Image (cartoon, rainbow, N blue to C red):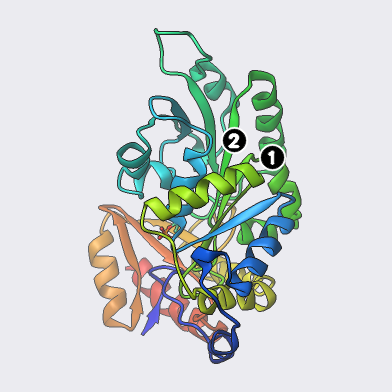
Amino acid sequence: MIDLRSDTLTRPTDAMREAMARAEVGDDVYGEDPTVAALEERVAAMFGHEAALFTPTGSMANVLAVASLVAPGEEVLCESSAHIARAELGAHGAITGLTMRTWTGPRGQVDLTAIDAMHAPDMGPFFVRTAAVSVENTHNFAGGAVLPVDDLRALRAWADDTGTRVHLDGARIWNAHVATGTPFADYGRIADVLAVCLSKGLGAPVGSLMVGSADAIAEARVRRKRMGGGMRQVGVLAAAGAYALDHHVERLADDHAHARLLGEAVGVDPAGVDTNIVVVERPDAAAFVAGAAEEGVRIAAVGPRTVRLVTHLDVTRGDAERAAVVLSRLAAR
Ligand SMILES: *Cc1c(COP(=O)(O)O)cnc(C)c1O
């Protein structure tokens, strides 16, 4: 089976498992796991921020990150198909007690005109106060779309003018970096706080980080423990993440090339394939998925007329070529 359902399906490689087995560990709730501390320092420095916090999931990193900017009863603005709005099961409302309003950008893009029109500064006891804007790069449900860094810089300038904070959901910021060559620090600079995932295309089994100021991270460390996210000898997992950063970032270019190949095979406009995700509109999504499975290619329907293909570490060039043959035959039917 060639599994193109998600880039979360990767299994740790033998070399990654060796790095995990060798990791020096301690009790991280006591602040005594050197492997976790090193990963947190490394990732904070990559993005030009003071500190970072290792979390079990990207959703937890996002909840902690947004909560560092938005108080209960305040709002965050985000794009209508953002992961924080659609795929975190209401955590930001249920846990933090914030509200959300959304704009709809073609391919998940930033729409500063819409953001400015929605923005509500502190209007006393009349309207919910807009505390932050959240952006997602790359944008998952927009098919791995890259947000141009110039748009993010314009958002940063607007946020500074209006006293608004910026959260970047960078679950796949690695893909944006590889696709555009934009340095990580440039992405770090546009955000007050970020969340990044090691368990997507980078291939670690578990792990994400929240990145931000020392104060925000200190506060998030308390909130993480309150949520049951204090972890003990978790250096074994941080070691997988460090290994991924050493060995699995630049190779994302292969995943992007494989996605372009698959996109061409199913007749998707190449302008719509920025990174490792291909979104295919099919009137017969369920039948298309079933037909592919019969021929050894697992893909996912993400809507009644929408199919998603995702390339990753466990999909070789040969796999991508074989899948392209199967899918182009099915698409032509
Ligand atoms: C996967 C993902 C997350 C985090 O998901 P978890 O499954 O909680 O690790 C956050 N944002 C985006 C855009 C994602 O794709």
Which of the 4 quarters of the picture holds residue 296? bottom left
- The label on residue 190 is 1
Quadrant for the N terminus, please.
bottom left
Seen in the picture, residue 34 relative to 227 is either above or below; the reply is: below
The residue shown at (31%, 42%) is 90
Q: Quadrant of ligand 1?
A: bottom left
C-beta proximity under 8 Å, tags 2 and 1: yes
The residue shown at (58%, 60%) is 275
Q: Nearer the viewer, residue 51 or 31?
A: 31
Seen in the picture, residue 289 relative to 227 is either above or below; the reply is: below
How far apart marks 2 and 1 lie (CA) works out to 7 Å
Residue 254 position in % (x across, y down): 63, 74
Residue 277 position in % (x across, y down): 49, 61
Label 2 sits on residue: 166
- Res. 4 in view: yes
Q: Which secondary structure lies at badge 1?
A: loop
Q: Which secondary structure lies at badge 2?
A: strand
- Res. 179 in view: no
- The label on residue 226 is none
Q: Earlier in the sequence, mark 2 or mark 1?
A: 2
The residue shown at (41%, 57%) is 280
Label 1 amino acid?
A: Ile
Label 2 amino acid?
A: Val
Q: Is mark 1 within 8 Å of ligand 1?
A: no
Quadrant for the C terminus, please.
bottom left
Residue furthest to the front in view is 30
Q: Residues within 10 Å of mark 2 (few under 14, many from 20)?
A: many
Residue 206 position in % (x across, y down): 46, 71
Q: Residues within 10 Å of mark 1 (few under 14, many from 20)?
A: many
Q: Nearer the viewer, residue 176 or 297?
A: 176
Q: Is mark 2 within 8 Å of ligand 1?
A: no
